[in-house]
Image (cartoon, grey):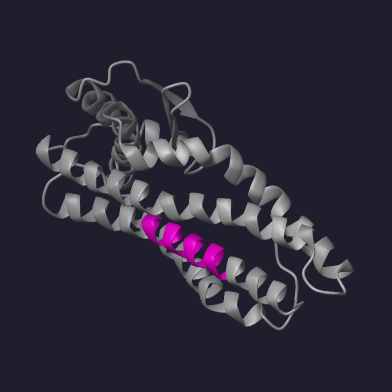
Amino acid sequence: MFFWDYTIFLIIPPLILALYAQQKVRSTYARYSNINSSSRLTGSDVARNILQLKGATDVNIEKVKGRLTDHYDPRKKVLRLSEGIYGSSSLAALGIAAHETGHALQHHDGYAPLHFRNAIFPVANLGSTLAFPLFFIGFIFSRNGPSILMDLGIILFSGAVLFIVITLPVEFNASKRALVLLEETHYLQGRELAGARKVLSAAALTYVASTAMAVMQLLRLIILRDARD
């Protein structure tokens, strides 16, 4: 949530980074979604084969609507691949499918950062929804120093920021696993692997931008809160 005040300059750099990251993802995905892999395996083939290879046979794979709506649901142990990834044999499809499979393997292997992120999700979700309204109400009506609502907003948003920060190693690890697995299984090699790496690197930049934006927003709240002292 944005509101205009003298601290708005803090979010300009991460906003520019976010816009660049979105454009980078779109252009990189468009480029490598038009280049098919020599293996001719589809995204769902790669995901299914890797899961079986690593013993995660209890994970189901589903096709979902939308563009780049791919994700792994740890509650139901379901790996959902978008229509453009599920049945495609492009370098982008194999890279993204392997990345989401990496999340499933994190869950299967008991990867600690993933479990920690899942554990704090309810708090983070509540924080991202209520933090700014509570803080803004407290900011408007406080006259003699910071209000309880302002402090509560900062505490709730801190939980959301923590969730976003811990997402970084989770996403980086999933991409690392994906590239290693694609190379080990020979599903992608050489320039093909380099293409998949570029797709995943572009996607990773969006998480970096989100983290930078969240941290700057938290800093804004703290500055505005201290200004009431």
Corner quadrant of residue 61: top left
Q: Quadrant of the N terminus?
A: bottom right
Position above or below: 101 against 148: above
In this figure, what is the number of numbered marks? 0
The answer to whether any part of residue 203 appears in the image is yes
On whether residue 105 falls in the magenta region, the answer is no
In this picture, residue 58 sits left or right of residue 197:
right
Position above or below: 110 against 3: above
The percent coordinates of residue 178 (x first, y second) are 24, 42
The residue positioned 60% from the left and 42% from the top of the image is: 123
Position above or below: 111 against 24: above
Corner quadrant of residue 125: top right
In this picture, residue 70 sits left or right of residue 198:
right
Q: Main secondary structure of the magenta part?
A: helix
Front-most of residues 140 and 5:
140
The outermost residue toward the top is 58
Front-most of residues 84 and 203:
203
Q: Quadrant of the C terminus?
A: bottom right
The residue positioned 19% from the left and 55% from the top of the image is: 194
Front-most of residues 97 and 77:
77
The residue positioned 22% from the left and 34% from the top of the image is: 40
Position above or below: 191 against 118: below
The answer to whether any part of residue 26 appears in the image is no
Range drawn in magenta: 203-216
The percent coordinates of residue 77 (x first, y second) are 41, 22
Corner quadrant of residue 66: top right
